[in-house]
Image (tube, helix red, strand yellow):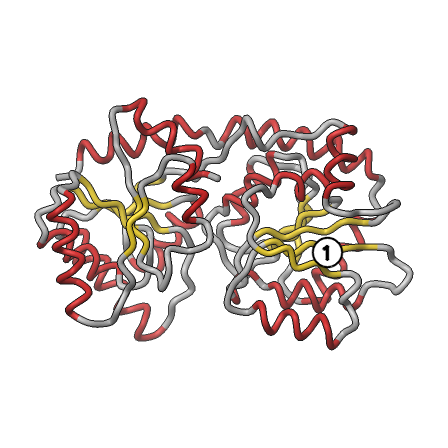
Amino acid sequence: MMLMLSAREWPKYGVTAEILSTGITTGEYAPTLQQAGWRVHHLPFRKSPGFFFELAGFLRREGYDAVHIHAERAFPYFALTAKAAGIPRIVRTIHNAFPFSGGLRRRRTLQRKLMARMGVVSTSVSRSVQQHEREHFRNETVYVPNWYDSAHFVPPSDAQRLAARQEIGVIDDQFVLVSVSNCAPAKNHMGILAALAMLPSDLNFRYFHVGRGLQESAEREFVSRNRLTEKVVFSGQQSEVRKFLWAADCFLMPSLYEGIPIAGIEALGSATTTLMSAAPGLQDFRQYCQGISWTGTSPKEIYEGIIKIRNIPQRQRRDVSISDAAAIKESFSMPHSLQAFIKLYAKVS
């Protein structure tokens, strides 16, 4: 959603932006991005010099003024290739507080130092990521926060909430839990599922798992093995997640680590009562929101957090969440972040 929205905004500042996908495929979301106005290119990543020769040729052919790198994987090689292709401005955004250790941490530290000397500017999506980069990798970054569509992700009226619950198939007074993310290990979906298996058998709940990824097969097996099939809905990739957030009684994000996730910003902006782990990246929300319930990352801690939220009257949860939504709207402005990037592109050389 952040990319879809910004596709309409960049031209207002005289900037034309395009996307290069380096995955095996362009991804399920590519048609949605194209429909929103993005030009999407595709060059599948390979661990070979041939890939980087192809990348350099692509960059020269397209004649970009700046390259903005978002991937951690092979980041230095992407930056070196862009430099060799004559790209005058190279920016890199760090999206997570990566928990690298040992030899890998030393290599990442050296790589970051070399890239900085080469003129690559790194940005962090949150103060936690900025601090983590400084303390763990001695890497100074520019803070440019993530943003969201504050006109779309808004608190629902009672009628809108009811309609959303009906649309996703919620019946009666079911307690609805939602997560929105890929199935990477850091998202801790297995912790969520194990917590759900602990819930009392008489608790009428449904959990909507929005997203796909590496661990989805294992997650589905766990659901089947623990007789949660009637309780857990694998909703897959969704181009419109707002209806799930409007319908939810609780948004779950017990990640092992994060940057500052857009899905979390959208949930809080939609006034969805939220259970989050006190992990790097997520803790940044403390300064904005009073209504977040904080948990650890173990199944028992997640279970206890869910029960705590379930015992708070729905109207009380909603009142606090609406107040938090106002704070989120004020703090994660898209124009502010876009202007920060544009100024950065102009300075980097």
* Total numbered labels: 1
Residue 334 sits above or below residue 305 on the image: above
Mark 1 Cα shell of 10 Å, populated few (<14), some (14-19), many (≥20): many
Kindly identify the residue that appears in the image at 37 percent across and 33 percent down: 7
Q: Position of residue 292 (x, y in %)?
A: 66, 43
Say which residue appears at 79% left-offset and 51% top-offset: 308
* Residue 344: quadrant of the picture: top left
Q: Is residue 309 left or right of residue 88?
A: right
Question: Element type at marker 1?
Answer: strand
Residue shown at the point (39%, 33%) measured from the top left: 6
Q: Give the position of the C terminus as an image quadrant.
A: top left
Q: Indicate the position of residue 237 as horizontal and vertical percent values.
A: 55, 53
In front of the other: 17 or 287: 17
* Above/below status of 104 relative to 243: below
In the image, what residue occupies the spot 52% across and 67% down?
Answer: 185
**Extreme top residue here?**
12
Residue, disc 1: 207
Q: Nearer the viewer, residue 316 or 221?
A: 221
Q: Quadrant location of residue 152?
A: top right
Q: Position of residue 257 (x, y in %)?
A: 50, 58
Closer to the camera, 310 or 15? Answer: 15
Q: Residue 52: percent from the left, percent from the top?
A: 17, 62
Residue situated in front as seen by the camera: 142 or 344: 344
Task: Say which amino acid is labelled 1.
Answer: Tyr
- Tell me if 109 is positioned left or right of 192 in this view: left
**Going by the image, does 30 lie left or right of 206?**
left
